[in-house]
Amino acid sequence: MNTFIEILEIISQKDEEGFTRKDEKCLYKVRAYLEERHGSLKWANMAAYTKANAIFQIRKIPGFEIRPGMLLRCDRGNFKVISAELIRSRYIELATEKIEPM
């Protein structure tokens, strides 16, 4: 586990005037193992069907489900979750795409 991450959910809210704004809600702060895209065999197999450019591995959080579309924030930037896969019922592997700030 080489980095700290925040698991964020984007919430759309309407104000009194009817305008919609998006807010971020921090759900958890955890440690994660981060592996960015490079020339390994694992990435070669994934390259054919995904636009993921980073994989995070975290320990499973009891009673919490990470869904595609959630955001992860760490010291290397913001990442959007593309898929989540349970590994050996203890870890969750998150395929993510880096999001550039607007």
Image (cartoon, rainbow, N blue to C red):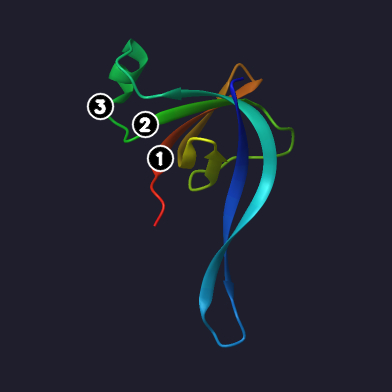
Q: In percent of the image, x 64 and y 20: which residue is there? A: 89
From mark 1 to mark 2, how far is it between C-alphas? 7 Å
Q: Nearer the viewer, mark 3 or mark 2?
A: 2
Judged left or right of residue 102, residue 2 is right
Residue corresponding to mark 2? 53
Pointer 1 and pointer 2: residues touching (CB < 8 Å)?
A: yes
Indicate the secondary structure of the residue bearing disc 1. strand
> First in sequence: mark 3 or mark 1?
3
Q: In percent of the image, x 54 and y 84: which residue is there? A: 18
Question: Callout 2 environment at 10 Å: few (<14), some (14 to 19), or many (20+)?
Answer: some
Measured as percent of width and height from the top left, residue 51 is found at: 32, 36
Q: Which mark is residue 48?
A: 3
Q: In percent of the image, x 66 and y 49: which residue is there? A: 26
Which quadrant would residue 36 be assigned to in this image? top left
Pointer 3 and pointer 1: residues touching (CB < 8 Å)?
A: no
Identify whether 62 is placed above or below 45. below
Measured as percent of width and height from the top left, residue 19 is found at: 51, 81
| Of the pair 44 and 67, the residue shown nearer to us | 44
**What's the residue type where badge 3 is placed?**
Ala
Residue sitting at the far top: 41
From mark 3 to mark 2, how far is it between C-alphas? 12 Å
Residue corresponding to mark 1? 98
**What's the residue type where badge 1 is placed?**
Lys
| Of the pair 85 and 5, the residue shown nearer to us | 5
**What's the residue type where badge 2 is placed?**
Asn
Indicate the secondary structure of the residue bearing disc 3. loop
* The C terminus - image quarter: bottom left
